[in-house]
Structure formats: structure tokens, C-alpha cells
Image (spheres, coloured by chain):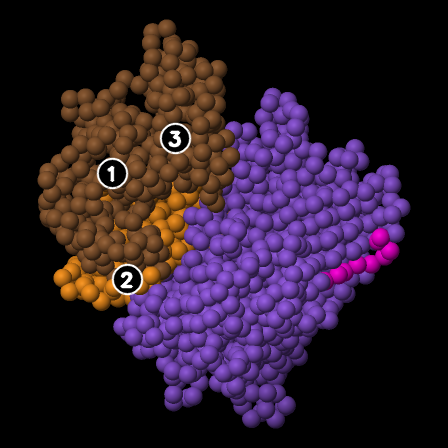
Amino acid sequence: MKPAKFGYFRPETAEEAVALLGAHAGAQDGAQDGARVLAGGQSLVPLLNRRLVRPRALVDVTRLPGLRGLAVTEDTLRIGALTRHADIETVTDPAVHTGFPILPESARWVAFPPIRSRGTFGGSIAHADPCSEWCLLAVLLDAQLIALGPAGTRVLDAAGFFTGRHRTALAPDELLVEVRFAHRPVLAALAEYSIRQRDYAVVAAAAAIRLDRWGAIAEARIALGGVADRPVRVPNAEKALLGAVAGAEAFEFAARVAAEDLEPPADVHGSAEYRRELASTLVARALRQAQAKGGPQA
Amino acid sequence: MTVLGKPVRRLEDRRLLLGRGRFHDDVSRPAQLWLRVIRSPVAHARIRGIDTAAALASPGVAGVYTAADFPVLPRIPVRQVVPGLDLDPYLQPVLATGFVRYVGDPVAVVLAEDPYLAEDAADLVGLDLRELPVTLDAREAAELPQESWGGRTPKAAVVEIGYGDVDRVFETAPRVVRVPLKVGRHGGTPLEPRGLVADYDEVTDRMTIWGATKVPHWNRRVLAQLLGIAEHRIHMTETDAGGGFGVRGELYPEDILVPYLCLRTRRAVKWSEDRTEHLLAANHSREQEHTIELAFDEEGHLLGLRDEVWQNNGGYIRTHGAAVGMLTATMMPGPYRLPAYRTRVHVVTTNKSPTGTYRAPGRYEVTFVREHALDIAAGELGMDPVDLRRRNLLDHRELPHTRPIVIYETPMVLDGKDYLEHFDKSLAAAGYRAWREEARAAREAGRLIGTGCAFFVEKAGLGPHDSAIVEVDTTGAVRVAMGGTNVGQGIETVMAQVVAEELDIAPEAVGVVLSDTDILPDGAGTWASRSTVVGGSAVQRAAEEVVGKARRVASDMLEVSPDDLRIENGTFVVAGVPGKRVTLAEIVRECFTARQLRNGEEPGLIGRGTFVVDVMTYPYGVHCAQVEIDPGTGGVRLLRYAIGYEIGRSLNPLIVDGQLQGGLAQGIGGALFEEFTYDESGKPLNTTLADYQWPRALDVPEAMITVFEDAPAPDNPLGVRGAGEGGTTGCGGAIANAVRDALGLKGSVLALPLTPERVKALLRDRGGKP
Amino acid sequence: MTPDITAFDDVPMSITVTITVNGERHELVLDPRRSLADVLRRELRLLGTHQGCEQGVCGACTVLVDGDPVRGCLLLAVQADGARVETVESLGRDGELDELQRAFTENHGLQCGFCTPGFLMLATALLRDEPGADRERITECVSANLCRCTGYKGIVDSIDSAARSAARSTPRSAARSASHGR
């Protein structure tokens, strides 16, 4: 199981990387991608090894400076695209933990430690697996994706960013450089289910709620992975929660509504019907866990 | 100093821990060519043409071959013959000839200077295939004539085993329970994929092969016939192997292609398959559809058992022939008093991967089916499932018990001591009654917790023979060569222990050679839990012969009676006379003198042992499980697990425990996680280890394992029953029973594996039960 | 599906890299599609690192790269340029088993041995990072890799035993390796 031939480039600057992507983009034909970005390789190399993708050129971006790390500035968490999953898991900056706890908390669900030591946040986002934890959280919290192209940077919203299974709104000559999460005063939780313990999720649900001082839900966000060709928000379920008192009854109702409109794709890990059932179970769990984060009085 | 029965640390460990194992992919020969197989991408087709021109022109390619490039080779023969069945029309050719019958069927091979170039070239081979209708279900397709079988139907054989007037029993029995059940397709899938290296030495005109395991002597015989050369020109040599489980070591097409092309090109040929190939092309197993019927009297005594089985054998019949069908039909009665019986197995070829044996073949399946049906019967009879079993288990008054069944051409003599007593002891060791109470209380509190057990009978020590040579050289070094092979199970250590016990030396002082056809002319291989029983007994005989001769020669050297000699730390001493002693090294040197030769002794100190056995031995045991179901996800969590196993005698408790723990993990895999599935076009859907899911560490509970040595096996000098498979055998049954109990089902769990999705469906359909 | 594999005139197909493996520097000229695991095995003849899947699922190929456990089949060798790699051959000294390896043989932590080097490297990283790891933590860590023979109990027992005896003999603060960082 060896990759097909490719050319390999290791640019020193992001601009060089973008230029290389552009130079090889046009080489695409039916069998071969033009160019692919190589970061941690944890998602791309398995595809290369099976020859499911055959890029003419790989652009290794791991040496690009300034793209690794998390920082909170002015209520916004900025995650460099080359930040490793393990960096997020072990971040010590208290501003990240107080303002955006769902991120370090969720890191431990991403694959396994040896994958987390190499795989990158940006790589995960760009790979756009419909059940990826980071893609799910980006959609849940309306993150912003910063892309660098030949004409400079542009900002894309998470809402339109994931366009299909392993497809994003990035142009072939664009490089994802940063992801930004604006601070939201919500209680957030991630609940996923894998058939083997701690393995890749079949379905994942993320929920974020803000309660008013009477315990009613003032803001609700629900996102699901593994139920479509991309992570999705479930606006009907979100609306159903607004104004309701946070608790089992509201959560179960929202969970049922969330599952109703889904038409999940079936695969070897789960049929459409089962994925709907899981979605319902996990939405309820994520909501309960989110509420519990508010402490005993919530 | 006795070493048998002690937890001797394994001799294999050091080199493996240092990363100095010698696995087939570690072998690198000068100027070797790498072999890459081109495999059918479709499940069933007529081959119209194969275009190799582009591949031949590809960089680094030394040759591209299809069936047309080979002389007419016979198809790969059956090794485990069931008398009376002609399976020849269904055997697999070395390369697909005329038709392809499963995704992964080898169609062509490339030889290249480098594995990357070989794969590049393989991509360029063009296949012109006219697709044919695909049959994936054994029962549905059994009677439809197939173009690819020359007009024959896909049903290759029917194996029927029975005794007593079973149909009459069912006509008149007061209570009959009928349960359709399916066992999902899964397989051994060792961590190390398959591979082979063959090199040809021009000077000696001999070919050496690395990577052969399981039955190297048999494979050499077949190869010699197929290649038309003398057996002694082929040398199968030892390697380490990354797990066997019944899958590795059988003669696959690649195992013939590699040596053949080595001889043809006069160059070393190296083949290492990748993981996806392995999941497509190495033997699958287990896929059976049963309809079992149990007949009882009003008190719950078994009057008869009938079973109709459809076995999905995949694209071709391979070296196991109808063996799994035969094992299914012979082992179904298990430990019970059973006056009348019949099982009929339809062995049907389909367009899935071909199948063979996998740890506890036939027994995993029948233990699940029978034990699950018993729990359902208990429900219908209003009896406790434990009591129902107690009522029907053979006990000390009836054992040994000869069933009117012939298995592997031997009479089935169940040589246990007391199945009923063992059942009680195993349940007590597990604390099963407490588990049940715990589960009942938890159910009252609203949790879905249940318990289940399964009694299994295993088979081991399949003959008819094995042989061994023990020799001591003039330096006093001891070496044993025996006909088993290393698949990671610790055989080297156990054989060393057997020799060490006889010679009173440390096991580390015994050199062990396995499966080297130059050193041992005959070996029957490692499979069917036979190597400790049959191989170990042969080793013991050989070691006894060495000690016997050494004693004779020592008594001559020391001028004492042989009875006055004792062996101590590899030295013969005269009882009560310190200083009057002679070492093995001294004895060996004496064994080359004219004096000894004139005495009629053979030169050197060499013992040969052959152990012949006409019957198998039958270990037995009980699996107990306690599970909890998550109603939201359908996930099954194993809360508690226990295995009780009567193995006659444990030669190395550390190794036995390891076999049971490992077997358990595989059994859990088959019960909950592992299945090879296909889409309607016959395309396999589980082609990576992310899709074909082995249990991970968190998925395997800490199991309580109790090994019993109450019933030494009567028919071998070591008294051992073989312990390699029992960790797996009972898992399907125990877990299915526990899940059924947890869900409060009246009927069955329908099928294994009990994936969360299937459990969710059972929850949904159980209708009204709390 | 026949990609044009010959027309790469304008792209580099051979990359020169320097990788330090078990303390030894190696300068290698490599086809960029070679994995680190493959290069360790074939160029450097360090055969202890095994490949069970080449998909990053089984972890048999686990090695340490700059102190972190990494799947050698998922790392292109050219990406290890300038890195410090440790393989199973770096454990122990002069053919003597180290503490962890001894624990594996005492506790029957291996059967066929194919997964073993991967687990040894995984455990080496874990015990450097968390010398006080308890059995639960060890089991969680062991879940990252696959074994088909042992059922994992022997592996967990072995690592647990090594952790406990290291804890007995070394003060906690000294055991943490300073050179390994995230």
C-alpha cells in the first residue's frame, strides 16, 4: 500500500506555499489531483497510501512560520492552522480555558494520542470529515476561517465553508491559515458515540446553550456530525429550545425534533435509521452535559 | 527440578522485545524481485482479456504474468479431506482462469525491482471483464447453475452427520423449540499480513522459502508435486509469524506463485501483502445460517436435536475443503445427553472471499447456536437456563462417552470426567449466581443488565501423528526439532520445558527448532490445538529415548547398574556416591566411540519420538458473561466475564492464560464488533482496520479465568488437552444469552455480531417488555 | 486509471534529508513517497518497527519523533528531516532488556511480538510523560494500538508493573524527562 508518485515541496513562507498550489492546480486531470497541502498527514497519508488520491504535487506546509499556536485576543480565540491537536489538549493559557473550554475539553476525543501529536487543527478543518470534532465545533460556534490566496487573505464563515464530504469552499490555490472563534457566553458540550470505545465517532452531537437568570434557554446551538455529508446545524431543534426551561423534558423534545429532518447517508458503520436514532440520543446527552457545566444550580 | 506446570518465562520474548524477530518481511535477499498481485475489482465476471503491455513497459518491471503464462497447474488441493466428497470442480486455480469469482481474486502478478514500482506497474494492468450476476447468499443461490462453474450449481457439498431416528423423535416429542440464527462472516485477520520469500541457490540447486508456517511439510509436498521437483530441493525454514489463528500458513495462490516464479526467474522473489489485500484475500470464516430444533420431554430432557445449516464458503473451496462443515456437524451435540441427532450442512460457494478455518472453527458457531437455543427453550419450558443444562449434561456415570459420530475419521470418544460437576464448579468460580442476582436487582432499578452462560466442548490433539528429534552434542548442548510451527503462541518455550523436564536442565538451555524441513524430515504442523498434545508427546518420547540411552551409556562408563543412576542438572550421578558422575557432554563423546557402536548403539545421543494417536481429546468449559445495554445507543458493555476451562494439565500457566485472554478478545470481536459485509454488487465494505473492527483494550473486560486440571487426558503421556481455542469458543453463546437476558427477549437475538445497531433494533422490536 | 507518472520534469522527485535515528545521524536521498517506517526498515535495516496496516490504525509502526509517539506509516520520511527518531532498537543497552521490556516478559505481555515494538514505544513515551500513570490511564493509552494475540491484559499488566517499579525506585520529579516537550 504505497502512494503513487508525487512531487514534494517544502516552502518556507505561506506566500510560496500559495504560489506552489496555484502552479500545480492546473495539472488536474481525471485521475490526478493537482496539488494537495500536507500538514500532519494523519488524514492525507492514509488516502495517499491507498491511492485514493493521487496528487501531482504535495506542498508540505509544516515549516511555515507563525501558524502554530492558540491565542486569545480581544475576546477571540485564534487557532493557527498548524496547531496540533495535542497543543489544544494540553494548552495552559487560562484565557482559553475560561473563554473557550469546549475546545481543550474536546481534544481528547480526536482520534488517539499518536495521531494528536502530529495531526493539525487546520488539517482537520480542511479535510472536512463530516464527523470531525473540530469541524463540528466550528459549525456550532460559527467560527471564521481565514484563507490565504494569491490575492491575499479572506474570511469565510463556517456556515458555508463545508460544501460536501471532504469538500470546502477553499479554492485550489488557497491555504487555510487560521480559525477564529468569537467568545460566546454559552455552556457547551460534545457527545459522540463510537462502536469501539474511544474510537472514531459514528455520530457526534455538539450543543451550546445560554440560560437567562430564570433558567430558561436564551440561546441554543446544536450541531451534528455523521448525519449528512457535512456537519450540520439543526435550526428547528434550536428554535424548539428557545424560551424553554432547561431540563430533561425540553432536551428530549429538542432531540426528537433534531432527528426528524435528517436523511443520513448509510455506510458500514451505521444505517440511516440508526444514525437518526443516535443523533437523537446524543443531542439529548450533549444538552444535558452542557447544562451540567453551569454547575449545580443550573 | 520440575518445570512442567510452571510459569516459565518465554524463550521467544527476548528477541521479539529487542525488535530482532525474523518475520517474513524482515527477510531481504540479494537482487530480489518484489511480487505484487493484481486482483479482480469485481465479484463475478468472465475474463475477456488482460492487457499487460503498459505494465511491462513500466520502470523496474521484470515480468508480468497471467494464467496463460503458466503450464497447466492443477488447482490448489484440499488438505483436510472429508471422505466421500469430490470438491475438485470448486478448487481455486493459482491465477484466475476464465472467470473471477470474488473481489480480490488474483488475476495477474507483477515482478519488479522495488515494491513501489511493482504497485505502480500493477495499476497499469488492464482487465477486460464481462460482469456476471452476483450471488452473495448461500441459501438463495444454491441451486442456480453458474457459468463460472461450467454449469454446475454453487453447492459444493452437503455434510450430514447424525444418529438415531431423529425425525421420528421430532414427530412425537411433547415440546419442540425451533430457532433460526445467523453467525456473521468474520475471520482471524492476524496483525502481520501474509507474505513469503523464496530464493534460489544456483550452486546447490535448491530453493529456500521463508514465511511458511502452520503446515510447512505438507505445503512442501504439494509444491514439489506442482513444480515437478524433488522435495529435498525445497527448504522451508523457520520464521517468526505475527499470529496465525488458522488463517496463515494454508496454501494460498500466492504461496505457489512465489516459489514458481523464483524458479522461473532464478531470482529471489519477495511478496508482502498489504492490509487491504489481507482483508480481501486471506480466508474468511464463520458465515453460517442455522435453523436449530430441540426436542424435549415435559421435564426438559433433551430427546433430539436437528439443525439445517447453510455455510457461505465464498468464491472457491480452498485447502480446508468441507472441514468446517464437518466440524459444525460433528461438534453440535456438545456436552449433552442426546439420544437422537442430525445436522446437515450445505457448503455453498458464493461471490464473497473464500473461507477456511478460524480459531475454534465450527465450534464457535455451534456453541452460539446450541447454547442460545437452550436459553430460549428454557424460557418456553418455564425453566431456569442453568437448571435446564444441569438436567442434560453428561456426568461422571456416563463419561467417557462414545457418540455414534466419526470426526476426522476417528470415533468421537468424549473423554471428559464429569461435565455436570465442571459446570457447577465453573459457575461457582465465576460467582455466577451473584451476577444473576446483581443483574436482577439492576433491572428492577431500570437498567438493562443481563447474564448468560455457555457450555462448550472443544477438540484438540488431532493426530494421526507428530514427530520430534532430540539431540545432545559433544559440548553438551541440547536441541529439539519438532514438527510444529511458531505462530506466536509460545510453542518454543513449552517444547523446551518438556525436554528440560526429562533432562533436568533449565528450559533456556534447550535449543528449539521448529518447522525446518532440512532438520526434521516430517512434521504434521500446528493447527487444531495439536502441538502440545501430539507434538509435545512426541518430544517427550524423543527426550525419554535420549535419557534412556544416556543412562545405558553412563552405567557402562561408570560401571554401575542403570538403576543406581539419577539425572541431576543434566548430569548422571550415582545415588549416594558423590564424585561418581558423568555429564551429558561426556556421554555424547563416549557415544561416538567404537565400544558403544559395537554394543549396538547408534552414533551420538539422538532420540527420535513419534506419537501416534487414534482419537482426539476433548477439553471443555464454560463462559459466563454479564452485560449492560445502553438503550440510547444499543451499545453492549461487558461488565463481567469468566471462563472456566478443563484442560487436563497446564504445562505453562502463563502461556495458557495468555491463550485464553487472547482467544476471549477474538471471541468478543466476533460477538460484538467484527463482520465482513458487502454491497449488492459484491464489493467488500470492510477493507481497512478502521472498518473491520477488532476490540481495543477498553473493549475487553478483565476476565476471571479458572483453569481446571481435574481430568487429565487419557490418551497422551502428558495428560494435556490443548488450550488454544477455548477462550474463543463460548463467547458468542455467553454474550448472546446475556444480551437476550438484559433485553428481556422472549425470542432470539437473531444474529451475531450484536452491533449497537442490531441491539437497537432488538430493543425496538421486543414490543412491550419493560 | 493511469496517472502519468513519468512527466515530472519540473518537480523534485528526490529529496535529501537528515534524520537522527537512535542517536545516529543519517543523510538520506529519498523518493518523497517513502514512509518513515519503510525507510527505517529498508534503508536503515532497523527491522523492529513493523507495519500491520499502513493506514495509521493499528500502531504497530509506532516510533518516537522528537519524543512524541507517532505512526511511522503516516509520516513521510522526508517530513522527518531534522527530527530525532527513537525506535525499539534504542531501548535496552547492549542487547540487555530495559525495565519496561523486562516487565513485558515477566507479565506475558507479548505472544507473536508483531505489535510489541509499537506498544513498547507508546509505553516509553507514556511513562516518560506520566511516570505515575495508573492502570486506568495505562489502559486508555494502550487503546491507541491494536493487538490480536494477547487480549491486552498482559500488555496492561506489563506497563503497570514497569510503572510501579519505576515509582518505587525513582523520585517523581527526577523521572520526568526534560528533553521531551509538546
> Can I make out residue B75 in this image?
yes
* Residue C55 image position (x, y, % from top left): 36, 53
Q: How far apart are marks 2 and 3 (CA)?
A: 37 Å
Residue at the top extreme of this rendering: A214
Rendered residue at 65%/45% (across/down): B733
Q: Give the mark, 1 or 3, whose residue is nearer the N terminus.
A: 1
Q: Which chain has been coloured brown in this picture?
A: A
The residue that mark 2 highlights is C3
Residue at the image position 35 percent from the left and 16 percent from the top: A294
Give the colour chain B carries in the figure: purple
The percent position of residue C178, horizontal first and vertical second, equals: 21, 42
Q: How far apart are marks 1 and 3 (CA)?
A: 20 Å
Res. A121 image quadrant: top left
Give the letter of the chain under mark 3: A
Tell me the colour chain C is drawn in: orange
**Same subunit under labels 2 and 3?**
no
What is the secondary structure assignment of the residue under circle 2?
Answer: loop
Is C80 rendered above or below residue B534?
above
**Few, some or many C-alpha atoms within 10 Å of disc 1 (few <14, some 14-19, many ≥20)?**
some
Q: CA separation, marks 2 and 1?
A: 26 Å
In the displayed structure, would residue A103 be above or below residue B347?
Answer: above
Horizontal side, residue C147 vs residue A117: left or right: right
**Mark 1 sits on what residue?**
A169
Q: What range is drawn magenta here?
A: B159-167
Label 3, residues with CA under 10 Å away: few <14, some 14-19, many ≥20: many
Q: Is residue B163 magenta?
A: yes
The kind of residue tagged 2 is: Pro
Callout 3 amino acid: Leu
* The N terminus of chain B sits in image quarter: bottom right
Where does label 3 land, which residue? A224
